Amino acid sequence: MTEAWGYFALGLLLLALGGDSIVKGASGLAQRIGASPFVAGLLLIAFGTSLPELAVNARAVWVGSQELALGNAVGSNIVNLGLTLGLAAVVAPILVRMRVLSPLLVLLALASLALIVFGLDGVVGRGEGMALLLGFVAALAFLLARASREDAGVRAEVEAFAATRTVLWMNLLRFVVAAALLYYGARFVVQGAPVIGAHWGLSPLLTGLLPVAIGTALPEIAAAAMAARRGQGDMVAGHVIGSSLFNLLVVVGGMAAFRPMALPESFVRLELPAAIAFVLVLYPMLRGDLRISRTEGGLLLVAFAGWVVLEIALLA
């Protein structure tokens, strides 16, 4: 058991380092080939932080643990919306000025609803997986089309996030290092997590849903808390919403497109509706005073804790 925890902890550390390296490398290469700092930053804010989860899920699918991958993909969304955003808002109220985030939150709810509909027969087929991937392309096009409407302050903040050196060899090296870190990080997490889950009496699905989803989110939770303290609310909300969209449309969609995927009944009845419920709670916060207060952050944390307790109670 100690060995499993060691592999799991080491894997999480490597994933965090690899995720940071690949984000910097992607930003540098994107700007090197002509992308504006604003566009590069916008894409990295929205989707860059999902790469560690993608590495874990790809490894899990590769070794035949599709249930763990599915649990991690959906569980990460609930962790993002409840734990990450809630804790960041408790640390410091989150002011959101980026106008594109509210429509993306609606798209997240629609993607969750689509997955529920696809899973009513218990299986998400290849065609449905392709539909989710096409949904990501549409979301990406929408994001880029709406980006020009952001005000100068938001643009400056996004460009500052994307700032990095654009030297070709340096960014290629970042990619090589990141690939190695993500590969071994995902390998160690997938190696250790099932042993830990089995020790706690968890199925592979619940192992991905709870310890793996929470564990892989820890670096992002710490980063979100620091960003909230610095007043970078757009960074926090953008990471959370974009990462959640990526998990559903690309990670789950990609798995289903690669191989038809069984969707457990509990996901249709509980986990995906829970993700939609978090979206419904967040939407008026982002559309109202554009601020997530400490009290609202506390409510998100209580809701997240309630969901965890419910999952454990149903297990018992």
Image (cartoon, rainbow, N blue to C red):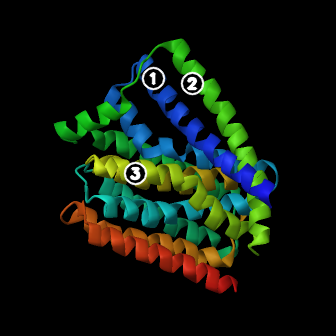
Q: Residues within 10 Å of mark 3 (few under 14, many from 20)?
A: many
Kindly identify which numbered label has been placed on residue 28: 1
Residue 160 percent across, percent down from the top left: 30, 31
Residue type at the position of mark 2: Arg
Q: Is 271 on the left-hand or right-hand side of 192?
A: left
> Could you tell me how far apart the alpha carbons at marks 3 and 1 are, in whole angstroms?
22 Å
> Could you tell me how far apart the alpha carbons at marks 2 and 3 are, in whole angstroms?
23 Å
Nearer-the-camera pick, 177 or 78: 177
Residue type at the position of mark 1: Gly
Q: Residue at x 28, y 46 (%)?
A: 230
> What residue occupies the far front of the structure in this picture?
2
Q: Which mark is in front, 1 or 2?
A: 2
User: Dividing the picture into quarters, in which one does residue 165 lie?
Assistant: top left
Q: Quadrant of the N terminus?
A: bottom right
Residue type at the position of mark 3: Ala
Q: Which residue is mark 2?
A: 174
Q: Is 288 on the left-hand or right-hand side of 227?
A: left
